[in-house]
Image: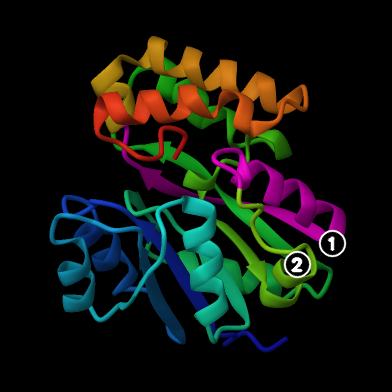
Amino acid sequence: MPHSQHISVVIPTLNEASNIGRTLRRLDVQDDPFETIVVDGGSEDKTRTLAQSWGAQVLQAPAGRAAQMNRGAEHATGDVLLFLHADTLLPPDGLSAIRTALDDPETTSGTFRLQFDDSTPLLDFYSWCTRWPWLRLCFGDRGQFARRSAFEAVGGFPEWPLFEDLELAARLSEHGGFCFLDAAVTTSARRFRRHGPVRQQLLNLYLWTHYMLGTDPERVAHLYRTHASASSEKTPLS
């Protein structure tokens, strides 16, 4: 595959006016060719207007991260899909790193390392853990990418209320070569600042354990939604 492969960056949003500008500004310095697709789930702030001002194609879909990202993938024109959260910044050469990884025909998908925009011992430890090729830590805030053919072959994101990112990574790894890039994205630590790093991570660990045990996501979705509602956040694991 040629090194200039076209990448479609799909960003799900819901009331992300305070973050979307920084995310799109970082995309603005990436190497072409790429397109940016923002899929909004019904924002009541200026998210859509800001996204359009940065040249993004803006779509609307029912709220739900998996459904929004699948909608974006349906409208994408790129050979490669990158799913990026609205509060996550790519490294300046992030798209080039993806292209380099996919120059290997055996590689079909992958993810970045993670670092936070704040530093605490717990956040630093979690960031350190993402240096290792552990598939079960491939949360969506790390930025997941895949060849379009691989994404379509595994059926896209399962439209679950949570864990859709972990499940996609697991399915992609079974379909072909899944790679772990050495470059790191920078994501917001806003959840940890709001709730406290220990409390937030305990909730994350509790929900993650249920996923590992095979619990139906609908059985624990009420915890996901309650926590999001209490903090005005819609994606507590994002």
Q: Is residue 185 magenta?
A: yes
Residue at 47% from the left image edge and 45% from the top image edge: 141
| Residue 134 in view in this figure | no
Q: Which residue carries the number 2 mark?
A: 108
Of the two numbered discs 2 and 1 on the same chain, state the one appearing first in sequence. 2
**Residue type, label 2:** Thr
Residue 121, x across and y down, in percent: 40, 15
Q: Quadrant of residue 228?
A: top left
Q: Is residue 203 magenta?
A: no
Q: Which residue carries the number 1 mark?
A: 176
Q: Which residues are magenta?
A: 160-189
Asked whether the residues under the numbered discs 2 and 1 touch, taking CB atoms below 8 Å apart as contact, a structural biologist would say yes
- Quadrant assignment for the C terminus: top left
Residue 28, x across and y down, in percent: 29, 74
How many angstroms separate mark 2 from mark 1 (CA)?
6 Å
Q: Is residue 36 above or below residue 193?
A: below
Q: Is residue 98 above or below residue 65?
A: below
Looking at the rendered structure, the secondary structure element under dot 1 is loop
Looking at the rendered structure, the secondary structure element under dot 2 is strand
